[in-house]
Amino acid sequence: MKNLKLAAGRADFSRSVIDVSGVKIGGEFVVIAGPCSVESEEQTVRTAIAVKKAGAKMLRGGAFKPRTSPYAFQGLGLKGLKILDKARKETGLPIVTEVVDTRDVSWVGEYADVLQIGARNMQNFSLLREVGKSGKPILLKRGMYSTLEEWLNCAEYILAEGNPNVLLCERGIRTFETYTRNTLDLSMIPAVRKESHLPIFIDPSHGTGILSMIEPMSLAALVAGVDGLEIEVHIDPSCALSDKDQQLSPAQFERLMKKLEATRLFMLELDDKIDSGEMAPTEAKDRGAGGRQGSFPEDAGRGGRKDRMVDDSSGGAAPDRSEIGHFKDSVD
Amino acid sequence: MKNLKLAAGRADFSRSVIDVSGVKIGGEFVVIAGPCSVESEEQTVRTAIAVKKAGAKMLRGGAFKPRTSPYAFQGLGLKGLKILDKARKETGLPIVTEVVDTRDVSWVGEYADVLQIGARNMQNFSLLREVGKSGKPILLKRGMYSTLEEWLNCAEYILAEGNPNVLLCERGIRTFETYTRNTLDLSMIPAVRKESHLPIFIDPSHGTGILSMIEPMSLAALVAGVDGLEIEVHIDPSCALSDKDQQLSPAQFERLMKKLEATRLFMLELDDKIDSGEMAPTEAKDRGAGGRQGSFPEDAGRGGRKDRMVDDSSGGAAPDRSEIGHFKDSVD
Amino acid sequence: MKNLKLAAGRADFSRSVIDVSGVKIGGEFVVIAGPCSVESEEQTVRTAIAVKKAGAKMLRGGAFKPRTSPYAFQGLGLKGLKILDKARKETGLPIVTEVVDTRDVSWVGEYADVLQIGARNMQNFSLLREVGKSGKPILLKRGMYSTLEEWLNCAEYILAEGNPNVLLCERGIRTFETYTRNTLDLSMIPAVRKESHLPIFIDPSHGTGILSMIEPMSLAALVAGVDGLEIEVHIDPSCALSDKDQQLSPAQFERLMKKLEATRLFMLELDDKIDSGEMAPTEAKDRGAGGRQGSFPEDAGRGGRKDRMVDDSSGGAAPDRSEIGHFKDSVD
Amino acid sequence: MKNLKLAAGRADFSRSVIDVSGVKIGGEFVVIAGPCSVESEEQTVRTAIAVKKAGAKMLRGGAFKPRTSPYAFQGLGLKGLKILDKARKETGLPIVTEVVDTRDVSWVGEYADVLQIGARNMQNFSLLREVGKSGKPILLKRGMYSTLEEWLNCAEYILAEGNPNVLLCERGIRTFETYTRNTLDLSMIPAVRKESHLPIFIDPSHGTGILSMIEPMSLAALVAGVDGLEIEVHIDPSCALSDKDQQLSPAQFERLMKKLEATRLFMLELDDKIDSGEMAPTEAKDRGAGGRQGSFPEDAGRGGRKDRMVDDSSGGAAPDRSEIGHFKDSVD
């Protein structure tokens, strides 16, 4: 994609890793979990303890809630950030929380480890530049009606301020379908892996809005090569002040995490399993995810775009990084 | 959903199985593969042999091609059907092919084992009634702009003629995004599993239009619980007369099939793996995909729709069928 | 647009005129009115008399109704066509009615003066070819999710069979907005006038689904240069079996027709009014292709498309047909 | 619509009028015109003089340009505002200009008469509250993927701060169609007139992105009852730094303004023309735009929403304000 000087995929297919208090986003599979909104200290701290126990590596929670109506619960603001801070002290989990106003970036940044830019603010260019200047890790959600190209250009806004720490999160797009809250676009996983070096996450909670879909979509995202997930978990979902119908209980989250971990370990070995059966001695030299019989040569895709995953099993091919994902323990 | 007398999910959560020459669609994981268009006997027969070898259970190939322009290749018609017949004789693979006109239903049905209704004809109600009357198995693609509700109502048109043999296939919907050919909506897998008893397939070829996305999306669909896939494979994609950029080569297809099979076997045991860690003796009796700690209670979803997957880990719960899918060998 | 050999706009900007029993579609402003469905002889004949009295030039009425559910009223079929025939005998109004099945084209064509292809069948290519072969005038509705390019290619299917008598009708497209039934795309009026020579109509009834919007949208379409309108009118809308909320009563229709006629006469003289005031001798020299001060030179539009409407009132230039529309009595 | 305490239509159907330096937005038909971006003093001042001469009542010009890419021209900022100030001094035209950052609201408000919120910032709730607090007139553009309900709720955010001076501007929504830059949704004119008391404008420049469409869409909007238009005009469009293909030249704008004025005067008398022919003595008492034979009774519209324009020709009906619009000189 033209004009993406900083966000575009690299020639060597290497991918960015963002270190957040030791959590290597882009280098290991990361689940960010927590309540939609910070509602009280008890609710947030108990939820943090529960998600940590289940294996989450970071805590999410909204202190500033973008609501369609001005009369809906808007979030606890500073009080909410202090509660998140308490939860971090209790659990050691780094905090991901949304910032909505350029004037708040520096002081919210005092509390947050990762600043989240919500879907409705994806093209709030002032805010992008401001969080760019902050240098803090930024989780940039895709706008509900934004193309991949616009999304990567928004990442470019942040990167252009000298802040390389951007992770992308797809959360569903708006379509004509009303059965789901949004239409979760999992094809963004291979798309981002091809067009950019930035980590790609999926938010299956907002992406579907339906509790029973969160598990299948999370597993699907994982095997498609996602770098991580952002999932809403509430200590008692029936009492939630927002997104009541889509937040997991701790028990549901724990079960999901077990499935994810088992599946992740399986995927780690999948390529080797497949290859050990078919790799003849001559081909052994060309291993790397791309250099195999049956991998994908350069493809044009729609509109003549060239597939950056060139494969040449005759030798010396650049590895097809889109496949490796987090099925390897080593950090990219 | 109201008015779906025949297509709606059943109270006992049982799912339909359609037997096509011994292939149990809905009862086992099925991959339908073959070229976009039937172009010549050599092309189609060689492709059939290749996909069979790789594990496909049915052959697809278009004899009547719906094209945007009247001047584009329209398919070989009857000649194409005879070629498919030859390929079936050679390989034993049942044939899936599109029918586009009410007048063709009976004689195309002489050749096809499964009649496919393409996306542009999803709401061609005359055609739906006609294939309903034929009694043949029907693969009903989702329209590129059709809601789940409209889609299931179209299935209802067919079922209402006394033909229970309908399988649904999601192939991507039209959105504002232009990076992919369509936006593949994998959430339709849990959605159909919840709202209907009919088998649900995914077509990742048309769904993305990008070769390198076919593998991740196929694996994603599998772990999300899909009943099968319909994939375009061509003996020599660079020479294809249609959809040149998205047809797999036999080698690529073979590799994908290996991954799918390994993943399928893994998923078969996943629930047991998870449970053996956590299942206490009393709960053992209530196993079945739904009766577990951490599974999903009734959820409202958007607009107050009730989640039909009721879970009660206290015992006697109806099994959560959405999870079982084809990770069991037994026929549902 | 490439590949439109027959449907594309002509070099001399001339526009097609389709003569239907003396009604010159494309040559005069035409309103087609009538009930959504033919429900009874009394309902249809009375409605026909009423719309004729108000100035409608053709009668519409559905005998075959495409319904989302198979259990909804499907139309009276042959009986409905006979009723339409009676209405024509009574009023002299030519009949426009939808045909849904290739097998019906010839015998429905015995009753209809114009065969309508509904939105859901826009890309039913078999049907397009069949109505093409019939030679009858065809009203081709835009699919609810079809691009202009696809739409014109569907017209090409019909024209390629040797049938030049195609009129296009925009009826709203499917978007995320749910306030209106569809989103009426009036920009299709100048778009079709630029890219094709075929007449362009608007259906504000399906296009909005809201009674009170029909008048403003009809007037808007008229001044934008539309060739005609297709409007639902029912002798007693509260009793209608379909589209109850969007059918006009005869009184409402009559009022609308008066406004349309007055506005049409006004628009006929508008260009002259403007010109007679402004053409000063010095400006005459600058005439040339953009040739009225303030007319539109060739413009690129999005994606570099050239605007084909060059205007030069100095003489010898092809007139800018997009502006003239039906504000002249003479036939194009 | 629920929860719209301040933005919802009033029981007496009265509409808001916003006085901006004597220009009565909502009370008279207003055209806001000017360049997409402020590029230089000469460009902006000359354009301002030209549009004023043609009848524009306010000047638009962007000093802060939201661009997809961070490397594109971002606007002249403060320098641009000073240029606009000069243009106002020269012509007396009030200024409409976009503000993009909460931190800029007060000082940009020193220069602007009307603060514009762009489509990408429609749901920038912090910004909405801040401009609400400013008390200045606000032009709120509809988001390219925002529903009417979301849009009116955003107006509510501003109104809830005690600032009643909000005018809405529809500028096209994002759809699958790529022929036009956006799909201009003129049905928002009657929709807003029904659901809210706020003035409704149309921006045909961004709404279509095609020069030759601006005139037909402007005329269409006018007869549909719009309160005004926001149109891009550049002294020399071929040299524009942004939106080169859709800015009118002064001559083109002048011609358009003449047509608009003539059409406006015509529409002012249209209802009377129609009525004088049909109004019987008893009906005379019930006049008022709504109280006529053939006007629109309460209609349900889609989803059972009630049409607030109740009409009862039996007497005493509330006037159907959606029709009056600006075809009367008197201020509502």
Image: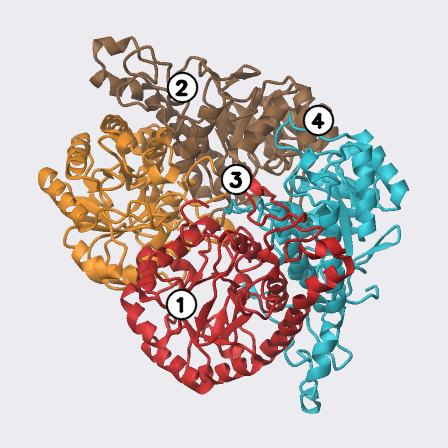
Chain colours: A orange, B brown, C cyan, D red
Numbered mark located on residue D137 in the image: 1
Q: Amino acid at mark 3?
A: His
User: Relative to residue B72, is residue B191 drawn left or right?
Assistant: left
Considering depth in this image, is D8 or C201 the residue closer to the camera? D8
Q: Quadrant of the C terminus of chain B?
A: top left
Q: Disc 4 is attached to a residue of which chain?
A: B
Looking at the rendered structure, the secondary structure element under dot 4 is helix
Measured as percent of width and height from the top left, residue B75 is found at: 67, 38
Few, some or many residues within 10 Å of mark 2 (<14, 14–19, 20+): many
Residue at numbered disc 2: B321
- Name, please, the residue furthest toward the bottom: C282
Q: Does the rendering let one see residue A164?
A: yes
Residue occupying image coordinates x 52% and y 65%: D203
Q: Amino acid at mark 1?
A: Pro
Residue at numbered disc 4: B105
Eye-nearest disc, 2 or 4: 2
- Name, please, the residue furthest toward the left: A89
User: Relative to residue C55, is residue D290 drawn left or right?
Assistant: left
Q: Disc 2 is attached to a residue of which chain?
A: B
State the separation of the CA atoms marked 4 and 3: 24 Å
Q: Amino acid at mark 4?
A: Val
Q: Are marks 2 and 4 in contact (CB under 8 Å)?
A: no
Residue at numbered disc 3: B206
